[in-house]
């Protein structure tokens, strides 16, 4: 579900189910999966707010990852339904921060953290965000 911007942030909630390939021998999700799930959250928040990432690229904007942080809070097992609550905000003049909180159906924390992405030209130079992006945060 899409939420209106608050305090210069965009918000969105999406769900996913833990796939069998995402769990380890302990029966819980493998640690690198949290960052993959963060990517699901990033993709879906941008889509929900009319900013499909392929359209960014077509217009000459790339979002390479420059920082990531994950706090592992609990387990998630095969076929668990997870909720991803994601917020998106400007983090400086030419970067975006995506904060993600992942919970299970009971509302228990599974993982939380954030990623920061530079806004760059395809040649790697930092560039100012497009006007259409800044308007969404107003």
Image: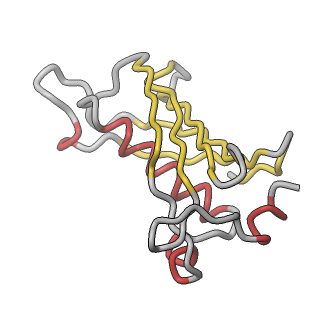
Apparent side of residue 39 relative to residue 13 in the rendered image (left or right)? left
Relative depth, front residue between 77 and 131: 131
Apparent side of residue 135 relative to residue 113 in the rendered image (left or right)? right
Q: Residue furthest left?
A: 25
Residue visible at 61% across and 55% down?
A: 45
Q: Position of residue 21 (x, y in %)?
A: 18, 43
Apparent side of residue 89 relative to residue 134 in the rendered image (left or right)? left
Residue visible at 82% across and 45% down?
A: 8
In this rendering, the count of numbered labels is 0
Relative depth, front residue between 135 and 92: 92
Q: Quadrant of the C terminus?
A: bottom right
Q: Position of residue 128 (x, y in %)?
A: 69, 64
User: Compared with residue 15, is residue 121 higher up or lower down, i.e. above or below?
Assistant: below
User: Compared with residue 61, is residue 87 higher up or lower down, i.e. above or below?
Assistant: above
User: Compared with residue 51, is residue 16 higher up or lower down, i.e. above or below?
Assistant: above
Apparent side of residue 82 relative to residue 95 in the rendered image (left or right)? left
Task: Name the image quarter holding residue 126.
Answer: bottom right
Residue visible at 64% across and 69% down?
A: 51
Relative depth, front residue between 3 and 99: 99
Q: In the rendered view, how is the structure colored? A: secondary structure
Q: Residue furthest bottom?
A: 58
Residue visible at 79% across and 70% down?
A: 131
Q: Position of residue 3 (x, y in %)?
A: 77, 49
Task: Name the image quarter holding residue 78.
Answer: top left
Q: Position of residue 71 (x, y in %)?
A: 44, 21
Q: Residue furthest front?
A: 125
């Amino acid at each position: 579900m899409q939420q209106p911007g608050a305090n210069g942030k965009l918000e969105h909630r999406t769900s996913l189910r833990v796939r069998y390939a995402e769990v380890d021998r302990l029966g819980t999700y493998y640690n690198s999966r949290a960052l993959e799930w963060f990517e699901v959250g990033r993709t879906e928040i941008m889509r929900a707010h009319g900013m499909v990432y392929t359209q960014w690229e077509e217009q000459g904007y790339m979002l390479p990852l420059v920082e990531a942080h994950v706090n592992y809070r609990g387990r998630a097992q095969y076929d668990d339904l997870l909720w991803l609550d994601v917020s998106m905000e400007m983090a400086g003049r030419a970067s975006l921060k995506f904060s993600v909180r992942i919970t299970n159906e009971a509302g228990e924390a599974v993982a939380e953290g954030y990623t920061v992405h530079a806004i760059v030209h395809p040649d790697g130079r930092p560039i100012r965000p497009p006007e259409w992006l800044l308007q969404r945060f107003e």
